Image (cartoon, grey):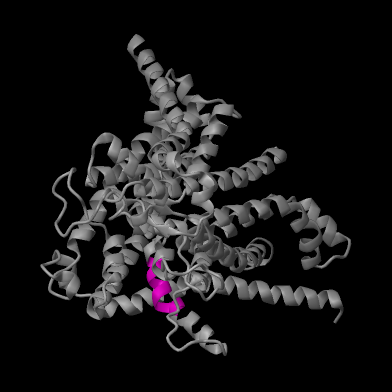
Amino acid sequence: MDKRQVEENIFKFLMGVSTSIVLGSLLLIVLTILAKGLPSLSLNMLIQTPQGGYYAGKEGGILNAIIGSLVLGIGGTFLAALIGIPVALYLNLYLPKGSKWATAVRFSFDVLWGIPSIVYGAFGFTLMIILGLRASLLAGMITIALLIIPIIARTMDEALKMIPAELKETSYALGATKFETALKVILRQAAPGILTALLLGFGRGVGDAASVLFTAGFTDNLPTSLFKPVATLPLAIFFQLGTPFPEVQQRGYASAFVLTVLLLLVSLVSRRLSKKYTKHIVR
Amino acid sequence: MMSRKIKDILAEKTMFLLSSFVISLLFLMALGLFLRARPILLVKPLTEILFSPLWHPTTGHFGLAAFINGTLWVTLIAIIIAVPLSLLTAIYLSEYAHKRVRDFAKPLIDLLAGISPVIYGVWGVIAIVPLVRGIHEFFPFGSDNYTGFSALTAGIVLAVMVFPITISVIDEVLRTVSREMREASLALGATRWQTIKYAVLRKAVPGIIAAIILGLSRAFGETMAVLMVAGCSLQSFTRSIFDTAYPLPALIANTYGEMMSIPLYDGAVLLAALILLVLTAGFNMIGWGILLRIEGGEN
């Protein structure tokens, strides 16, 4: 065997090892969380809010955090969609191909996507002071929305780019304005892409803790008002793991299991939906 | 008839305004943080804040050097681990792997990107902390009560968190290298690896650098996972991979409860956030700028 072949084989081997490590780490994370979390999970944890002394090992559950995360995630995604969807439509329908403004907007989204969530949290905090808000569901929703606008808009933008130009032109030829085309043709055609984008943003919003640490606060109660603090799953996990009591830490693992399953479900559903809906699309 | 036209124009104007908001958001964020950080900048020179290792808010000392040092340690460790693994994985997926393997692996890597940072932290506590403790015990200098919470632990967890972005960007970049180039090299009798080494990678260098910069920025700003596994002790100034580290983002996250009660404290913390914003925005602009030029060069 010549030297070149040896080198080829060495690198092939290294690539195999690397790919296994990368994919293996995902498997390892999921398995670790499953193995540690599932045994400590009980029905009570899912249907009760923390009772007095919960963080010292007394009775209760994390329903406050589960409901809180869902409400916060849905609210934040809704706010982000209000900005993200119109901008993505604007980029693809109103601006000509190769427009400088479109390039600048896309570039801004890419950069914003890379800004750490703790910075969004800190900015949300300054915004709160300016608006005179306290740590609350509303402040958390606004911060989450800012965090996921780039994700929703950019993912949707990629989906809209795939829409054939003929479709738009047909709609214009029938006398529709751009706005009508956007609402009645493009949004329908891009429905799977939009759904995927929304779910991706929702997943990121639900999973993030650093941005809501300052802004959403934490509470043992279920969310009842936009102006009161709200509990979130990632923070519940963080706090439970931070206690010195092994039985509470166990519940932290169980909570981590709940969050992981939730996020994996969101991811699977978005994949499923986008496959299902692509059937009804004009190609 | 008129009302339809008016609606269309109104929609366009609204969308334009929204897109202006997106472009200005970065500046708004920087401005907002700057305004809150100003009180401390007025009484203390920036150089003192950046280079003094003394952090003692109750006595009015706000030196960030220990935290900046901690950030550099964990980021560097993460990048040293993540870059070779990402590069080899991306090369394998784009150049060698069967389409079926690729279709199986890509969604899994996307899934890795969707896992919550706190989950990474929990995994770090359960799996990586004992691993690092084991590695440490292997060395003769190991002390008995070593906890395993360290810069290395944070670096390993961060490396896994960086994989999705670096792998997907490198993979994209490799795919933009033209087929003709590969075929020409193979036709000259080069092996596949030689083709990759001499033709493909050389062409892809800028894109790979962009991927590394984007990964670096990701590791730089990651907060919760690091907070959970790095040890984050105020006593230490990280000098080795086995020392605890207390990176900037973790500092910001850890002070949320107390920072409003001490004068200038909130200014110092929000200044730390501003520093993070400026650096990560800079990294991302360079990274995406390079990728934009590659894309532009293609058309």
Where on the picture, by quarter, is residue B228?
A: bottom left
Q: Nearer the viewer, residue A266 or B101?
A: A266
**Residue B7, horizontal then vertical, whole percent:** 35, 17
For residue A195, side relative to residue B75 (left or right): left
SS assignment for the magenta stretch, majority: helix
Magenta segment, which residues?
B119-129
For residue A204, side relative to residue A103 (left or right): left
**Residue B109, horizontal then vertical, whole percent:** 51, 63
Q: Nearer the viewer, residue A206 or B127?
A: B127
Where on the picture, by quarter, is residue B123?
A: bottom left
Q: Residue furthest front?
A: B59
**Residue A206, horizontal then vertical, whole percent:** 32, 55
Residue depicted at 56% across the width and 46% down the height: B284
Where on the picture, by quarter, is residue A260?
A: bottom left
Q: Reply above or below: B28 against B237.
A: above
Q: How many marks?
A: 0
Residue depicted at 39% across the width and 19% down the height: B8
Residue depicted at 43% across the width and 69% down the height: B235
For residue A75, side relative to residue B171 (left or right): left
Q: Is residue A208 visible in this depiction of the protein? A: no
Is B126 a magenta residue? Answer: yes
**Residue A224, horizontal then vertical, whole percent:** 13, 48
Quarter of the image where the N terminus of chain A is located: bottom right
Q: Residue furthest right?
A: B188
Q: Reply above or below: B245 against A125.
A: below
Q: Residue furthest top?
A: B2
Residue depicted at 83% across the width and 61% down the height: B186
Q: Is residue A282 visible in this depiction of the protein? A: yes
Q: Nearer the viewer, residue B30 or A139?
A: B30
Is A124 a magenta residue? Answer: no
